[in-house]
Image (tube, grey):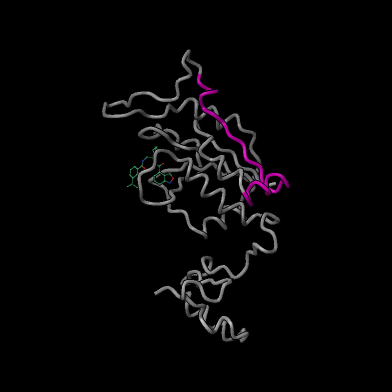
Amino acid sequence: MYRFDVITIFPEMLNSVLNASILQRAQKSKKIGVRFHNPRDKSTDKHKTVDDTPYGGGPGMVMKIMPLARTIKAIRKRKKHRIILLSAKGARFNQKKAQELSQKYNHLIFVCGRYEGVDERIKYYIDEEISIGDFVLTGGELGSAVIIDAVSRLVPGVLGHTESNQDESHSTPGYLEYPHYTRPEVFDGHTVPKILLSGNHPEIAEWRKKQSKKT
Ligand code: 4FN
């Protein structure tokens, strides 16, 4: 089983992703396992605080290091684990990274930021920072959902034969997906390219290759 641990104060943000379709089946068949950890549970003050005002002043709140570091330390880690902070500053996530994570490790631990950010000293407790893109998010939760989705489908046994893993243009540099069509042959006057109905499979393969080339 490939394991994912997500450190978050909003686990509900991941539930829709994990409790549907392929990822739900993968959990039921024990191909993957996902656990949530709320840093609030490791906070020791009366109000279970996880955030505080920034040193130096300025707007907003910062996630406190203590509850996060204690949560990371309390997770029983496998030998081949990787602790990842989701962050705007991180290296951009892509298919190559998904493949690397699926092959080198069998346990990913995600730290999801909230508020204005996380105390910089989190750097002593993580292995790397990853970003899913250049936009402002309310937290790292959707980033961890994206990575869990992309990595899980690369875990052996997660995809059924109809959801096949081969011929994936997005893992081939310079190629995007080719256009897909299914029945009916004509819809609202819009037709299917004749080549796809020809039964000429070498020609179809050639057409798809041409269509999927990035410009
Ligand atoms: N975002 C930018 C610059 C500065 C801040 C942000 C931002 C969530 C805790 C981080 C953002 C982007 C991609 C997690 C954005 C990601 C996050 C991510 C993220 C709350 C602090 C914050 C990129 C627009 C210049 C908020 C841009 N991938 N700060 O969004 O966690 O994973």
* Residue 128 percent location from the top left of the image: 48, 45
Image quadrant holding the C terminus, namely bottom left
Please count the marks in the image.
Answer: 0
Q: Against 104, is 172 above or below?
A: below
Identify the residue at horizontal 42%, vertical 48% (top origin).
90
Q: Is residue 49 magenta?
A: no
Residue 59 lies left or right of residue 209; in this view the side is left
Q: Against 55, is 20 above or below?
A: below
Q: Quadrant of residue 15?
A: top right
The residue lying toward the viewer, choosing from 33 and 74, is 33
Q: Is residue 23 magenta?
A: yes
Residue 148 lies left or right of residue 213; in this view the side is right
* Residue 117 percent location from the top left of the image: 38, 35
* Residue 119 percent location from the top left of the image: 40, 31
* Residue 150 percent location from the top left of the image: 55, 54
Identify the residue at horizontal 50%, vertical 39% (top origin).
126
Residues shaded magenta: 21-43
Toward the right, the furthest residue is 29
Q: Against 60, is 20 above or below?
A: below
Quarter holding ligand 1: top left
Identify the residue at horizontal 44%, vertical 38% (top origin).
123
From where the camera sits, is residue 130 visible? yes
From where the camera sits, is residue 205 visible? no
Toward the top, the furthest residue is 46
The residue lying toward the viewer, choosing from 1 and 163, is 163
Identify the residue at horizontal 61%, vertical 55% (top origin).
153
